[in-house]
Each structure stands twice: as C-alpha cells, then as structure tokens.
Amino acid sequence: MLLTYRALKRRALAKRLAITAPNGIDESSYVRIGGIDQWISVRGEDRANPVILEIHGGPGASNLVFTPRTRAWERHFTIVRWDMRGAGKTFAAGGPEGQGELTLDRLHEDALEVTAHIRARLAVDKVLLLANSFGTVTGLRLARDHPELYSAYVGTDQNIVEGGRNPSAYEGLLARLEKAGRRKQLARMAAIGPHRSAWSPHEWAEYAKTVVTTDPLTYDTMKTVVIRSLWFSPLHTLRELRTYLKAQTFSESLGPQAMTIDEYAEGTAFQLPFFVFQGESDVLTPPQPARRFHDEVTAPVKDFALIRGASHFASFRHPDQFLDLMLTKVRPVVTGEAVGR
C-alpha cells in the first residue's frame, strides 16, 4: 500500500513538472566535469529568464529532490541543479571509487567548470549564483573571486565560518540539551568541544544530526520537507534514494575542512550584488552571524531578509516566501526591470 501511494504521488508530481512552454527548457544529463561524469539538470519555462546556478549543501545533499517544491521558481528563472562529486546522481554513477579528489578546492574548480558549461550551453554572459547551507562556503568563494562570471550572489542557510571564533550555535545546542534534560547527548557534545576544526568527520556529522533532531522546527522540516521530498521524488528510483543517503556519509570529510576557513579574513569586499535570505529561527546556521557578516560586506547592492517561520532549509520549507524575495529584491537588480510577478 505504501509503495502504491508513492507511485501515485510520484506520477502526479511528474505531471506537474512537465514544461510545455514553447521557449522552455528541460534537460538533464551527465557532463564531464573535473575528470568525472557529473549530473546537471536545467529547467525553466522561458530561456530568456535569468539563469540560476545552485550550489547545494550537505555536504553531499543534492537539491534535485526539491524540484516539485520549487516548480513556481521555474516561471521566473532557469534553474540549474548540479549534483556535485560525492552527491546524488553523480555519486550514484561513479560510486565511492569514482568520485576522485574530494576537497573544497576541487569543488571550487568543478563549480567554475560547471559555470563555463552553463554559460556556453545557454548562451549567457553571467549566471545568478544561489548557494544554500554547506554550499555557501563554496558560494562565497566563487562570488568573491569571480564577479565577472556571476550577476549576483544569494546565500540562504548561510554559513559564516569565522575560524572557530564564534561558538554561538554550539553553545545554543548545549543549552537546549541541558534544558531538555538530555544528559547523555549533552555529555557527548560537551566532550567534542567547541573547536569545529578539530572535529573528526564523524563528530562533525554527529553534531549536525544532534542540532537537527533537538530543535522542534528543524526536526519537523527534516521530516515534512526533506524526507518527504526524498520519498516522493519523481526524479529518483528507490535505489537512487538509498545512494543519496550514502553520498552524505561519503562526503562527511568535507565538513571539518570548511571549519578552518575565516570568512572575514577571506574578505568582505564583493564586486557584485550580494543578498542573504536566512530562516529567522535557524539553529544550524543562525541568522545573527549571517547578519553581522552582511553588515560588514561592501557590494554594489546588498540586502538581508529573514524568512518567517523557518529554521534551516528555509528556502525549501517556504519556497513561496523565498521566490517573493528573489522577485522583489534580486531579479530587478539582475535584469534592470521593474519589480513584478
């Protein structure tokens, strides 16, 4: 009965995803990037719309499963979803042995290759860079170093890694555990200490899981948005869903690598429009550090906004709110057009 319901739901979602507009695009295939085959999906109802390149989070957590939730975005933007090495269909195709070098530097170089591919394929001068969660670490670096390639930067679930100087999210977790009387988890998290750059990949993943499962809003989002999107995705088989989860475990080693970065030392000067849209109740990547960083940024245009009723995964829990921000704040800057839906 469960599998029958899944099949019916997937069929209905697949019908909703059909793009029939005469100037629309719906392409997906493996492209040779960084020496391996990597999955790239391109969807939109009008090729004349601004092109968004997503840098997904996790690490190892493809955004492709959220395509039905973000269907309305495709009326106003062409969305490029790329499964990085170590994630989604890219991981499924090559397996653990076929992912090559798994480092932040390699992901950065891959992203530049994907950008070049998309600019050529869609015949556009620049693409709009949209990074979420762990992907914002790479996203900030791309935006900072290559303003000639990107029309704007948008970060959501924005990570601000400060070289270990800001333990506020960690301290917030300890406070929640103590208040809830979860002594065993409290002792475990206290034992790993606040210095994330010293954590093992397993400790980094354990911390993230504990944050997600001990905050009611984040945990509800994980169940109703993330897991539900995985289970009913019309773009994934059951085997691919199992592989999807294995990819996240495989990619855990990227976590501690990122924790050595100091975004302030990397630089707060951006030569392109800069936007941060953060869940107002995010406990994994709290809005306060993101707001402080935004306030220090110099950019031709910049803006910061909170997504109401959202913790982490804010853009996917409330895709309508996120789209409204994209249409009222970002699209006019990128296109030079007046605000409009």
Image: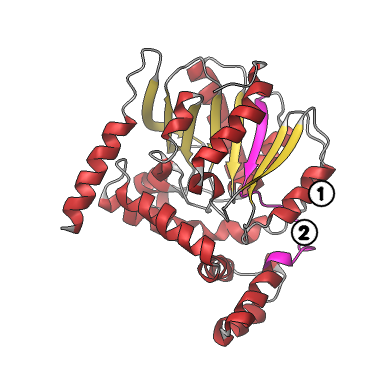
Q: Which residues are magenta?
A: 149-169
**Crowding at mark 2 (Cα within 10 Å: few <14, some 14-19, many 20+):** some
Identify the secondary structure beneath mark 1. Answer: helix
Residue sitting at 66 percent across and 80 percent down? 190
In the image, what residue type sits under mark 2?
Gly
Relative side of 293 to 287, left or right: right
Q: Is residue 261 among the parts visible in the rendering?
A: no
The residue singled out by tag 2 in the image is 163
Identify the secondary structure beneath mark 2. Answer: loop
The residue singled out by tag 1 in the image is 264
CA gap between label 2 and label 1 equals 9 Å
In the image, what residue type sits under mark 1?
Tyr
Q: Position of residue 321 (x, y in %)?
A: 55, 40
Q: Is residue 304 above or below residue 281?
A: above
- Image marks 2 and 1: residues in contact by CB distance under 8 Å: yes
Q: Is residue 233 above or below residue 45?
A: below
Q: Nearer the viewer, residue 333 or 30?
A: 333
Residue sitting at 36 percent across and 12 percent down? 22
Q: Position of residue 218 (x, y in %)?
A: 53, 61
Q: Nearer the viewer, residue 107 or 293?
A: 293
Q: Position of residue 191 (x, y in %)?
A: 65, 82
